[in-house]
Amino acid sequence: MDKPREAPSAACPALFIAAPASGQGKTTVTAALARLLRNRGKVVRVFKTGPDYLDPRVLAQASGQPVDPLDLWMAGEADCRRRLHEAALEADLILVEGAMGLFDGEPSSADLAALFDLPLAIVMDVKGMAQTAAALVAGLAGFRDDVRIAGLIANACGSRRHRELIEEALPDTVPLLAAVPRDASLALPERHLGLVQAEEIRDDLEARFEAGAAALEAEGLAEALLALPPVSFAAPREGALAPLPSLRGMTLSVARDAAFSFIYQANLELLERMGATLRFFSPLADSRLPPCDALWLPGGYPELHAAGLAANAPMRDELRRFFAADKPILAECGGLLYCLESLTDVDGETHAMLGLLPGRGAMRGRRGCQGMQTAELPEGPVRGHAHHRSVAEGTPEPIAFGRRQRHPAPGEAIYRERGLTATYLHLYFPDNPDALARLFMSSERPASQTFESEESHG
């Protein structure tokens, strides 16, 4: 019997954008690079390392292409390999933006770059230093022998002389790829959980992308990127990706608006590949739910829109009826806050929420909780992460806790009331499709008995 044929490899130039620490301008530079090549008529596929909702949407607008996460712990090697292979089949260039510092975390950006043999460009904010920037890059380049540094992109460079001092001090093996001028109009705006959502400032972002692309164009970086040697991306090995469970015949409603927007495109794609029909609705603007069998309330910024959520009484009534019908609901982070009895917003004002779960939510200043965790659901473990600066108090006894990646202390609480599963954790559905299928299919009522709004019968 013949062996199964392996899918052929795909080759494409690629560059990993890393830094010595957070806050160096990785996203600003990655977005500018993507727009620079897009303006040349090239197809640029961008990936973001680690759990992130905001940066990918900025990068998607800059590149005009979907942006997926690459994370060896949360997604796994096979998932990362499949995404890179598929991107290489269509792209002229692949860009991967790292997370935190190059060697931070387990696995780190360096681990991902080494696994797929991606050359690294180091982005460094050089304000307040000159030759020391060269020393830091030399240290990064020599720290591990399984990563290769393609060069330095000096961000926030003050002058031509500043650039010369850095370039003259760099070792011969680490060239200066570009010097980005110190210009506030290039930087991307931020808020308490990171970047402002792309949809809120689309026109402003366009101006910043074009300004960044022009700055890098002047450095001759487009030619340097397109001249990078191709990297070969093998297809996942036979059997590396398990067959998917079926959600065929199920309709899943997903909250998506300014208050609920922390949604991995990979999660939506998986649900559709499993056969689910997706319907989107706005808890802020809509008065009723689409006809559906299950509901997903993802994370977002309900604390910025608590007054609007509280004022939409028809939608709150709809969701309470859905809950009373024992239909499956998954509420993550901001979705959890929406399900509580009340939420105190960023201005200290308290607003009534859905009341599906006992408890009160409130913002808590600058300190927050973040980190990689596995949600120990009754349906099976699902990897994900936590990132919030709020607290939920007066909640019922959890049915389980998240398991932290590298710490024995219990992670985020997981609550279950009737068909509702609520937690601060953001789940990466492709980690365990079987568990998600069981969660969304679980109900005391047959899946065929689709929930319909009372208005839909009028």
Image (cartoon, helix red, strand yellow):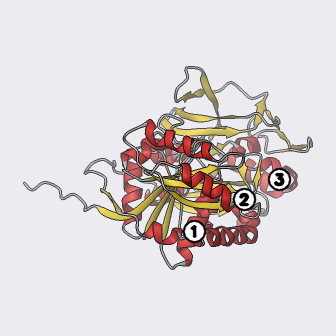
Q: Is residue 126 left or right of residue 272?
A: right
* Residue 195 placement (x, y as % from top left): 71, 53
- As shown in the figure, which amino acid type bears the numbered disc 1? Glu
Residue at the spot x=74%, y=40% of the render? 356
Mark 1 secondary-structure assignment: loop
- Residue denoted by label 3: 305
- As shown in the figure, which amino acid type bears the numbered disc 3? His
Residue at the spot x=31%, y=52% of the render? 236
- Residue denoted by label 2: 182
Determine whether label 1 and label 2 are within 8 Å by CB: no
Between disc 3 and disc 2, whose residue precedes? 2
Indicate which label's residue lies in the foreground, 1 or 3. 1
Between disc 1 and disc 2, whose residue precedes? 2
Mark 2 secondary-structure assignment: loop
Residue toward you, 294 or 101: 101
- Residue denoted by label 1: 219
Mark 3 secondary-structure assignment: loop
Between disc 1 and disc 3, whose residue precedes? 1
The 10 Å Cα crowd at callout 1, few under 14, some 14 to 19, many 20 or more, is: some
Indicate which label's residue lies in the foreground, 3 or 2. 2
